[in-house]
Image (cartoon, grey):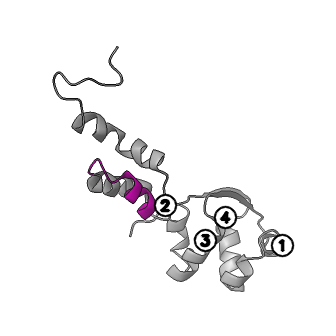
Amino acid sequence: MELCEPYDTLREFLPAHEIKEIYMIFRGRVCYFPQKPAETLEKYPDLNKVLTDSELSEFCRRFGGSNIYFPMSIKDINSLRKIIRAEFDGYNTAYLATKYNYSERQILNIVGHKLNKKYKPLDGQLSFFDS
């Protein structure tokens, strides 16, 4: 599976199950991580349940002093968009939204160009956008 940042960097020094736990803690948030492990644990005590002392030190070495955005999705966004476009059939917006933990609006934004090309009104058919 292709991971997006910062999850891809975490894979360099953490096992997959710990990356998933970090994802569950921080997803959808922008977090500032202090450079010192003690300060990081003070700010984010849940990390103590996930990371060992050496892993926390490495985490702070790589991310300390930075604001990091943890996306809602752990997968690479571009790869996921390609998958959604391929699975979209014009009628399964709600299904895809549930499956990929997106809103229906986000799904429609992702497949919008596909909708415009594939589902144009037939010749002579009226559209809401006709003037």
Up the image or down, 62 lies above or below 48; here it is above
Q: Secondary structure at mark 3?
A: helix
Q: Position of residue 110 (x, y in %)?
A: 39, 45
Determine contact: label 4, label 2, CB under 8 Å: no
Task: Measure how far apart labels 2 and 3 are at the Cα level.
Answer: 13 Å
Nearer the N terminus, badge 2 or badge 1?
1
Nearer the N terminus, badge 2 or badge 3?
3
Q: Which class describes the residues within 10 Å of circle 1: few (<14), some (14-19), or many (20+)?
A: few
Question: Amino acid type of disc 2?
Answer: Asn
Task: Measure how far apart labels 3 and 4 are at the Cα level.
Answer: 18 Å
What residue would you read off at disc 3?
A: 24
* Eye-nearest disc, 3 or 4: 3
Question: Amino acid type of disc 1?
Answer: Glu
Nearer the N terminus, badge 4 or badge 2?
4
Q: Which residues are magenta?
A: 89-101
The answer to whether 94 appears left or right of 74 in the picture is: left
Nearer the N terminus, badge 3 or badge 4?
3
Q: In this orientation, does residue 15 appear?
A: no
In-front residue for pair 80/89: 89
What residue would you read off at disc 4?
A: 63
What residue would you read off at disc 2?
A: 101
Q: In this orientation, does residue 107 appear?
A: yes
Q: Secondary structure at mark 1?
A: helix
Task: Measure how far apart labels 3 and 1 are at the Cα level.
Answer: 19 Å
Question: Amino acid type of disc 3?
Answer: Met
What residue would you read off at disc 1?
A: 42
* Eye-nearest disc, 4 or 2: 2
Up the image or down, 105 lies above or below 15; here it is above
Task: Measure how far apart labels 4 and 1 are at the Cα level.
Answer: 16 Å
